[in-house]
Image: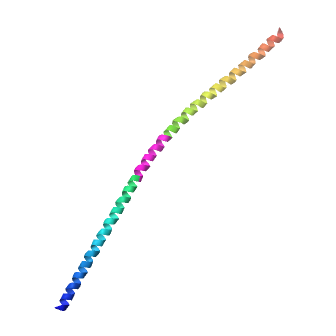
Amino acid sequence: QDKELKASLMKEKEQTNAIKDMKKLIDDLEAEGKTADNLKNKLFSKVESNKKLMKEIDSMKRESDQQDKELKVILMQQTEQTNAIKAYDAQNRKLMVKLAELVQKE
């Protein structure tokens, strides 16, 4: 009877230890799950933040492209104005030469 009691107590102790081990394992798994959820949430937040940044970058690029177009137009206008001034100067020089020729003839 003493042996049976010892065997029963040993079995009960083993079961208690197994239950403790299972509880510990469940607690560890829950902690890992919370950590995984936290990491998932942080990752999701980073992804959303990156999407927002990409939209801002796209917007800035569109603005920059628009400014480039406007600058090209201004440069073309300045080139046209410069060419017109050069043509005016050339015409003016021709008229001065003709005027000088007329003055010499008189």
**Front in this rendered view, residue 71 or 91:** 71
Q: Position of residue 92 (x, y in %)?
A: 72, 18
**Front in this rendered view, residue 44 or 99:** 44
Q: Quadrant of residue 34?
A: bottom left
The N terminus: image quadrant = bottom left
Q: Left or right: 89 with respect to 53?
A: right
89 shown above or below 34: above
Q: Left or right: 38 with respect to 78?
A: left
Q: Residue at x 45, y 47 (%)?
A: 53
Outermost residue to the left: 1
4 shown above or below 82: below
Magenta: main secondary structure equals: helix
Q: Quadrant of residue 29?
A: bottom left
Q: Which residues are magenta?
A: 46-60
The C terminus: image quadrant = top right
70 shown above or below 90: below
